Image (spheres, helix red, strand yellow):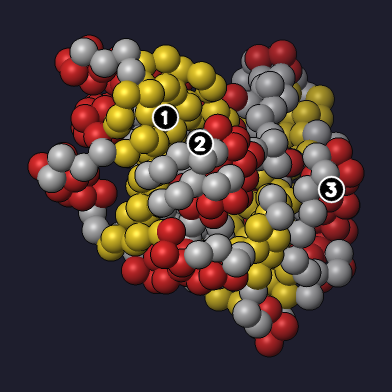
């Protein structure tokens, strides 16, 4: 594979091990290709995907001089498997590749049983997709599905893509076990099928809300939180989501796990509208979970702040004395401090006492390299309200 030679400005310590290099840091480029050998002050610095058209020009996949091959992908799979299975103890389903955090820039892979779902969002990875697919074959995965439709992909100038690479006939009625619960996996649904970044939060929130009488699960999707609430003896869950197929899967998951289907009420509705309806109807809950989609795709967080303030205002109006509130953001631009500030504003207006019991984060199979804090994106809290 032809490799571009890229010379960077400055010195190696200007960059450290950060996986990204923007176009304005490039001193010169010779040759053509999608892979680059990167040099600083005449010395080799790393191997990277190269996008000649993007502001984000280089994404490092190695600091050794090596091509991005199926063999490299196979080696990264083995390393990531060991971290997830032997160190974290995750079995059956987990995030195998968390892009740059696993030396696989713009490549996400989630394992579901004996197959995997990949997402590709970088220019170089798209051009070298054949090597990625072959690496998964070599590693023994029986099927491979791609669901590449992220915002980051559009930023790289790539069209959305979704489809099978191989093994469609082997996937069948796909179900996996997480936290001793059975989940149906909708490959054509949101993300790669499940929100695996919440697996530890599902368990923690369920345990802390154990035995509650009436819990609202807003933005419920296929029931990650709902199932864990039922596991810990919650008497009634009200699940709200706009996705009717997700709600049907939620009901199926409830039944599959042997829970009483009458313990869950589902509503297909816009959550903001439904919260307003609950307030007008003087409904009350002793716990509420808010797990919305990303409100901020970029650095402008003005609209996101307004959205979170509205959610917190309605939740505080609906919560009983001593109620629990779990809330999340899945945008890297939304910090814990921003979330807590909007909660504080809502609490101040309604004169309610709120104490944060836990700060919540993404599951550790979505690791955060110390040199790449942008990998942290899921933040939340669990609070008690008086």
Task: Pick out the residue farthest to the left.
Answer: 280
- Residue 324: assigned label: 1
Disc 3 is placed on an element classified as helix
Residue at which label 3 appears: 85
Residue named by callout 2: 209
Quadrant including the C terminus: top left
Q: Earlier in the sequence, mark 2 or mark 1?
A: 2
Height in image: 346 above or below 231? above
Give the number of callouts. Answer: 3
202 sits left or right of 244 in the view? right
Q: How far apart are marks 1 and 3 (CA)?
A: 33 Å
State the SS at label 1.
strand
Label 1 or label 3, whichever lies nearer to me, is 1
Instruction: Tell me the crowding category of disc 2: few under 14, some 14 to 19, or many 20 or more residues within 10 angstroms, Cα based.
Output: many
- As drawn, the label of residue 14 is none
Return the residue nearer the eye: 258 or 16: 258
Do the numbered discs 2 and 1 sit on residues whose CB atoms are within 8 Å?
Answer: yes
Mark 2 to mark 1 CA distance (whole Å): 7 Å
Q: Is residue 325 left or right of residue 231?
A: left
Foreground: disc 3 or disc 2: 2
């Amino acid at each position: 594979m032809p490799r571009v030679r890229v010379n960077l400005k400055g010195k190696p310590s200007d960059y450290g091990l950060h996986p990204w290099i923007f176009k304005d840091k490039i001193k010169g480029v010779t040759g053509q290709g999608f892979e680059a050998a990167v040099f600083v002050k005449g010395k080799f610095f790393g191997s990277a995907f190269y996008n000649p058209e993007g502001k984000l020009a280089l994404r490092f996949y190695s600091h050794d001089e090596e091509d991005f091959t199926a063999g490299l992908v196979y080696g990264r799979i083995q390393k990531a498997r060991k971290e997830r299975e032997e160190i974290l103890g995750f079995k059956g389903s987990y995030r195998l590749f968390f892009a740059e955090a696993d030396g696989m820039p713009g490549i996400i892979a989630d394992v579901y049983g004996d197959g995997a779902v990949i997402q590709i969002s970088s220019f170089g990875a798209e051009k070298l997709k054949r090597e990625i697919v072959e690496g998964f074959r070599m590693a023994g995965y029986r099927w491979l599905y791609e669901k590449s439709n992220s915002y980051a992909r559009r930023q790289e100038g790539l069209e959305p893509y979704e489809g099978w690479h191989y093994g469609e006939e082997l996937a069948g009625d796909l179900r996996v076990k997480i936290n001793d619960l059975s989940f149906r996996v909708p490959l054509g649904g949101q993300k790669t099928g499940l929100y695996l970044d919440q697996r530890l939060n599902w368990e923690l929130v369920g345990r802390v809300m154990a035995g509650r009488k009436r819990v609202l699960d807003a933005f419920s999707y296929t029931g990650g939180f709902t199932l864990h609430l039922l596991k810990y003896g919650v008497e009634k869950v009200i699940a709200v989501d706009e996705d009717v197929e997700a709600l049907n899967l939620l009901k199926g998951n409830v039944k599959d796990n042997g829970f009483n289907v009458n313990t869950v009420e589902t509503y297909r509705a816009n959550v903001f509208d439904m919260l307003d309806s609950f307030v007008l109807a003087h409904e009350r809950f002793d716990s509420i979970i808010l797990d919305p989609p990303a409100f901020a795709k970029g650095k402008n967080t003005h609209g996101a702040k307004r959205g979170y303030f509205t959610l917190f205002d309605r939740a505080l109006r609906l919560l009983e004395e001593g109620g629990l509130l779990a809330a999340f953001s899945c945008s890297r631009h939304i910090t814990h401090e921003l979330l807590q500030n909007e909660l504080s504003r809502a609490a101040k207006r309604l004169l309610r006492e709120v104490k944060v019991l836990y700060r919540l984060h993404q599951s550790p199979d979505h690791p955060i390299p110390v040199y790449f804090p942008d990998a942290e994106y899921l933040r939340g809290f669990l609070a008690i309200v008086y």
